Image (tube, coloured by chain):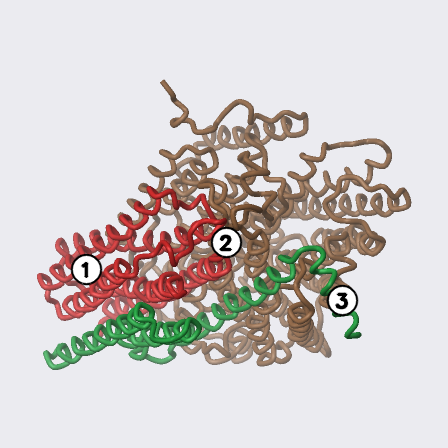
Amino acid sequence: MDWSWLTGRLSADYLPQDPVTIGAAVGMPLAILAVLVAITYFKKWGYIWNEWVTTLDAKKIGIMYMGIALLMLARGGADALMLRAQTALEPLGIELFDTQTFQEVFTAHGSIMIFFVAMGAMFGLINIALPLLLGTRDVAYPFLNSVSFWLFFAGMVIINSSLVFGGFSNGGWLGYPPLTGLEYNPGPGVDYWIWALQISGIGSLLSGINFTVTILKHRAPGMTLMKMPIFAWSVLVAMVLVMLAFPVLTATLGMLALDRVAGMHFFTSDGGGNPMMYINLIWAWGHPEVYILILPAFGIFSEVVATFARKRLFGYATMVAALIGIMFLSFVVWQHHFFTMGAGANVNAFFGIMTMIIAIPTGVKLFNWIFTMYKGSIRFTAPMIWFMCFAVTFTIGGVSGVLMAVPALDFQVHNTMFLVAHFHNVIIGGVVFGYFAGIYYWWPKVFGFTLHDGIGKLAAYAWQVGFVLAFIPLYILGLMGAVRRLDSYDDPTWQPLFIVSGIGVGVIALGFALMVIGMAYSVWKRKELADTTGDPWDGRTLEWSVPSPAPFYNFAITPRVSHRDEWWERKKAGLKVPTRSDYKDIELPKNSALGVYIAVAAGLIGIGFIWHIWWLAIVALIAVVVFVIKRTFDDDTEYTISADTLYKLDKEARA
Amino acid sequence: MTSHAAHIKEKAANATLGFWLYLMTDIMIFASLFATFVILRDGTNGGPSGQELFNLEFVMAETFLLLVSSFTCGLAYLAIKHGQKRRTLVLLGTTITLGIGFLSLELYEFGELYLAGHDWTHSAFLSAFFTLVGTHGLHILIGIIWAIALGDYISKRGTTPDAVRKFSLFALFWHFLDLVWIFIFTVVYLLGAIS
Amino acid sequence: MSTQSYAHEVRQYTIGFIGAAALTILAYLSVKLEWYDATTTAIFVLVLAVMQFGVQVYYFLHLRGEAKPRWQSWSFVYSMAMMLIVVCGSLWVMYNLNYRMGMSGEQMEQRMLEENKKGF
């Protein structure tokens, strides 16, 4: 009896073979097991299910996103340490990893950092901050929000399980065919990569719709678009990009999957296929993606700089114009990622010019932040230090990007370490520093106490120094001809630079450790660091008008907005104490388990396709349909909190 | 208007915008598949092109089944807006039947190609064809399942404001699929048939 | 709701249906009966497709009925614009790449020699 239909291509051959992978493959499940045992021992399953897994509260969903993002940062960072350790030590004759493992490590590094750290932190911070900044209770579609998070979680599980069983893709974070096609990569690694991205990508797409409708339709009464905080504008623009770009990723990964699973010829080198089409499409997504990541970070800095300079943001209207300009331009530059693929001068010139133009609105924003600081009364708290680090670091990265926008120049540095240095420069300097600033800025609103400022600043300095040591040498190496993604380099004069780079990653790791230590220390000292007023920074926007930690209903009374920086204006005019009649009944979403069920089923579809267990994919697909239909038949999805209860809760929270 | 009624109206406007934005994302998926089809349509790998394979009369039949179903769907939406439960269900049933008819013809077309050896593994052109037209067909299948569930909902709970809202979203989806079909019909079949 | 507006609404859908059907038949006939040469026919059917798209969007999707601010209309216009940029941009880039990267080595060498003769 042939049982292969039951288990697909599962086989013991896919268990890890080398010591490093075996170590990780054993360590990770053990760590998870330890956590599960602890939860059982402390009898916390009910709490976790009711308060976290089935919640539709955006703030809690945001916290879960952040937790996963920070965990994945540790994993992606460990990958980076491995990569730089290899190139630093290899000339000494120490080969830490064989080539296949090295390829899998840099592929995992990139994929995890972009899709699970950056996207995760972004959605986490938006979930936490956006409704509060808009003066509303939750996002437009709370159930969809839960689905999005759990799809993200499912993708994270898939990508991490590749470590334990099957191995990961070796095709780089964008997986170019024909290397990632069936002929050259028949194993499950590339399929793991495809489905982790596909599943979490759908989560991202749904969030794009969710946050857009939230911003367009759920602002507090009186808050026109031109009165809403710039962070909300940056999220709006980023989500428009998500909605237009992610479908291209879905379609392209889908076509690659069809090549691999159904023997199609989209991107094969035979049968009429065209691998260049993949590269074209994937970058048509990929370029908007990097703007998706950076724009909310810009938005955070707009809030942070105004708050800690005690001065309203300079040039609100031009900031909005710049955001909209970037939104449009980010869709006309994608070809600059493959100048060297062979297009003619006209094509390269057009996209090169467009790329140079897109630097202008970004420059406008930078100047506006600086002008905001001018004659401001600046407090150098940790978020402000992150901004200062960003201002210098990101500018260097941006400039190196404009340099590469010139096709003739790009021909010299494409796919060298110069490119690697550039994108880490803008991602670390911009995205990472921005989201870290957001974490330190909004932490008290979420948890009720501030993070220890001194340790936070030390962490920022460590990241800044570590970044310089790790990446400036890569600029030099790239110009000297060092190609990317190699595990060994012939030229011995390059080795000192690789060693400096390796040390730099170590200093960054120190910075990360300081952040974690700072968080742990702050939890320990949370009584001393408590935020008793809800407004620890003397802030300008509405989130600081509610107690800390923010109550589950956000605002007991829906705020009526008449100004930009509404909270600042209210404090100036003198705060009124609300009377009992100001409170009204409110409706909030009930918890739901269907979000996590849908995501588990979606994950199983992925597993089915990865391991060719077709019956599993089909059953899981039917399950998704059933769960979705079940939800649509549920008309009783909200519960009411009476005005009386609200009045009592609010009085307690403000005491 | 009571605050609860206002809440329902707000939910409806909410749902429409959100679903509309989802349709915009679906346009981008189809756009990617269309662009790929156009680029790869000459990649026949020595095999047949559209001109040799496509039967325009058959495609016209498919087109009219879908177009009429879009019409009956619109009429069904008007019926549910005016609280006419029986009429809604009849028109919805017609829409579903026509949709199943469309899908049957399409499956027959695919089956014929497959049995003649012109399946998706033979060339980039065929891969792109089956994927583009097949993705549209998959959306139609999802629409049919949705319509059946919707019919069940309406027959059990009547033409409530919630039901009208849900129907309007289905109608948007179904009309959208006919819009995409205009371009499949034109770009894949008509342009393919021009010598 | 009045029966008058109901009848009006039904009329709108009927006009849309007939318009779409007519445009479909017209396109089909132009190809089947070979009214024009290949290029003209192609442009003709594409124009008819865009027209039918407009007819269906107007009569079936009621884009105009929206209350201000017209988010659906604006998001539709913007999405169409971005879609056209991605599709047309991809076609431009890919045709260019296919042409240049599809020639043989000798053909490319010939071409570069000629381009260099023209100077910078």
Residue A350 x/y as whole percent: 65, 72
| Position of residue C94 measured from the top left corner of the image (x, y, whole percent) | 57, 62
The numbered dot on residue C63 is: none
| Res C60 → quadrant | bottom left
Chain of the residue under label 2: B
Secondary structure, mark 3, is: helix
Give the amino acid type for the residue marked by disc 2 in the picture.
Gly
Side of A403 relative to A20 (left or right): right
Q: Is residue A451 above or below residue C1?
A: above
Amino acid type at circle 1 is Thr
Number of residues whose C-alpha sits closer than 10 Å to that of mark 1, classed few (under 14), some (14–19) or many (20 or more): many
Sequence order check, earlier mark of 2 and 1? 2
Chain A display color: brown
| Residue under pointer 3 | A403
Chain given the colour green: C
Res. A395 visible in picture: no
| Quarter of the N terminus of chain A within the rendering | top left
Q: Which mark is residue B43?
A: 2
